[in-house]
Image (cartoon, rainbow, N blue to C red):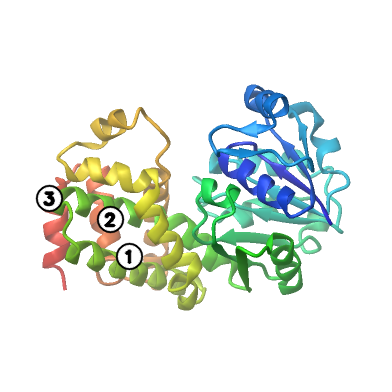
Amino acid sequence: MANITVLGSGVMGSAIAIHLGNNGHQVNLWGTKWDRETIDEMKKTKEHTHLGVKIPETISFYYDDALEEAIKDSKLVIIAVISKGIESISKAISPYITEDQYIMSITKGLHEETLETMSTVIRNALPEDLREKIAIIKLGGPLIDKEVAQGKYTEALFASKDIEAAKYVRDLFKSPKFRGGVSSDIDGVELCAAFKNSYAISMGIIEGIEQESNNPKAALMARGATEMANIVEAFGGSRDTALGIAGVGDYYVTAQGGRNGKFGRFLGQDNNVEQSLEKMNHQTVEGLPITKNGYKLLKKLEEDGKINMKKDTPLFLELYQILYEDKPVHEGIASYWASE
């Protein structure tokens, strides 16, 4: 049994905490002041209504002002906040982190200004003398919160420059229905976790246009995986990462069951970006900022001679023009199909 802290009591953070609690670990689930109502409900009812599961007795709850207490005895600290909050929470925990602790991120995205991966943002927020001493792990793969919490068959990838740390965390998650692999390609996993949101929008778009037709969806599934592999390789990672569970696996589940795919379907049904967001009650669509920041990153890689966007990422380029340059959806998809 291990002591683990999960920072962020949203549905994914809660699902991870519940899975680990069911594995017999002592889990501290911490939430911000905005999460107090959710935490109070879980404490009172001993259930998570959205996830449809009971809360294990091994989970303890902490609020915003108890951050130090929540992490002080934990071997593993899991960051499960949105990408906009990753820098602030990393800075907040930096005075309390010690070199014998591990940090794992499940946050997906790129820093809006620096274009750094989430793991790099975390590392740079740590005290300088600890940056090379604390192992940072990235969790990747197809992980729908409800299915994780409910104990459905799941496979994930744990990536870190410190392979032994990745193996340690993998074993904490392991159960009869949860298996995991390890990889040193943390940058590749980070990029897949981010860019798959964009490609999931494109999958939704084609589904909105062609409805139940399978040929176009299969084509964009393959194209999205190939382009992610090109991006990862240009960044210095392994193509195999994009073509495995952290890339194709996560891409598939996001396109099929996530908000990005749903948003794309509205776009494909002749709604513009704002209309599509309105139909979703302005829920967060991770693929929107990812496409914007990802475009900036690809432009930088192109300037460095590491990628050719027209040749290596034509689908992403069309998606960016649809989302941010007002290119009509049907014209964008037609342009992609006419490209070589």
Residue in the image at 82% along x and 43% along y: 71
- Residue at numbered disc 1: 224
Q: Nearer the viewer, mark 1 or mark 2?
A: 2
Q: Amino acid at mark 3?
A: His
Q: CA distance from mark 3 to mark 1?
A: 18 Å
Q: For the residues labelled 1 and 2, say whether their Cβ atoms are less than 8 Å apart.
A: yes
Check the image and report above or below for 152 versus 87: below
Q: Is residue 92 visible?
A: yes
**x, y percentage for residue 304?**
42, 69
Q: Amino acid at mark 2?
A: Met
- Residue at numbered disc 3: 330
Q: Is residue 296 visible?
A: no
In the rendered view, does 166 fall on the left or right side of 107?
right
Pick the residue in front: 311 or 80.
Answer: 80
Q: For the residues labelled 3 and 1, say whether their Cβ atoms are less than 8 Å apart.
A: no
SS at mark 2? helix
SS at mark 3? helix
Residue in the image at 38% along x and 60% along y: 252
Q: Could you say which quadrant of the image residue 56 lies in?
A: top right
**x, y percentage for residue 9?**
64, 36
SS at mark 1? helix
Q: CA distance from mark 1 to mark 2?
A: 9 Å
Q: What's the mark number on residue 203?
A: 2
In the rendered view, does 225 fall on the left or right side of 271?
right
Position of the C terminus by quadrant: bottom left
